[in-house]
Image: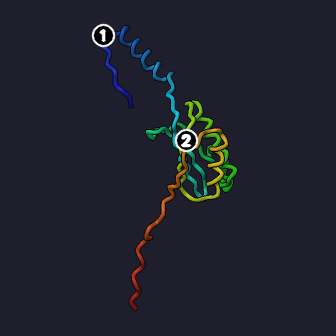
Amino acid sequence: MGKKRIITQSNTEGSANQQVASSASKKLSKRQVINGVAYIHVSYNNTIVTITDSRGEVIAWSSSGLLGFKGTKKSTPYAANLVAKDCTEKAKKYNLTNIRIIVRGIGPGREAAMRGLAATGLNIISIMDATPVAHNGVRRKKPRRV
């Protein structure tokens, strides 16, 4: 919830002004993110694109439901393309130039989201597939005794 600041009565005006000025300068200075990672989560119902910096802190995100698509329209390739473009426009405020793409899930908007990221002019360093694959499945049902 933030740092607690205790102001003594002797330095009420001087220290309070310094604290306000320091917190305001932190908010005004935007950080520069040159290398980023784009996580594309594609399902049969929705497409979510999240762009983070190299440490994993989220810079921008977008989904097809956020853009106003409803129902079955959320999972279309057109919606996935617009989601990717919208997310990169939000991330360009941080001077993002290089990007790595990590795709997770299967769905109709999989390649369309990657094309949308490529069309915005970002340098794509690598594309990785992180779709979870079941190794063995669930345990078999025991045989029925009659």
Classify mark 2: helix, strand or loop.
strand
**Tag 2: Cα neighbours inside 10 Å, few (<14), some, or many (≥20)?**
many
From what the image shows, is residue 13 above or below residue 32? Answer: above
Residue 86 point in image, percent of width and height? 64, 40
Whether residue 39 sits left or right of residue 141 in the image: it is: right
Going from N to C along the chain, the mark reached first, 2 or 1, is: 1
Marking on residue 99: 2
125 and 46: which is toward the camera: 125
The amino acid type found where label 1 is placed reads Gln
From what the image shows, is residue 112 above or below residue 17? Answer: below
Whether residue 6 sits left or right of residue 92 in the image: it is: left
**Tag 1: Cα neighbours inside 10 Å, few (<14), some, or many (≥20)?**
few
Marking on residue 9: 1
Marks counted in the figure total 2
The quadrant of the picture occupied by the N terminus is top left
Residue 124 point in image, percent of width and height? 58, 43
The quadrant of the picture occupied by the C terminus is bottom left
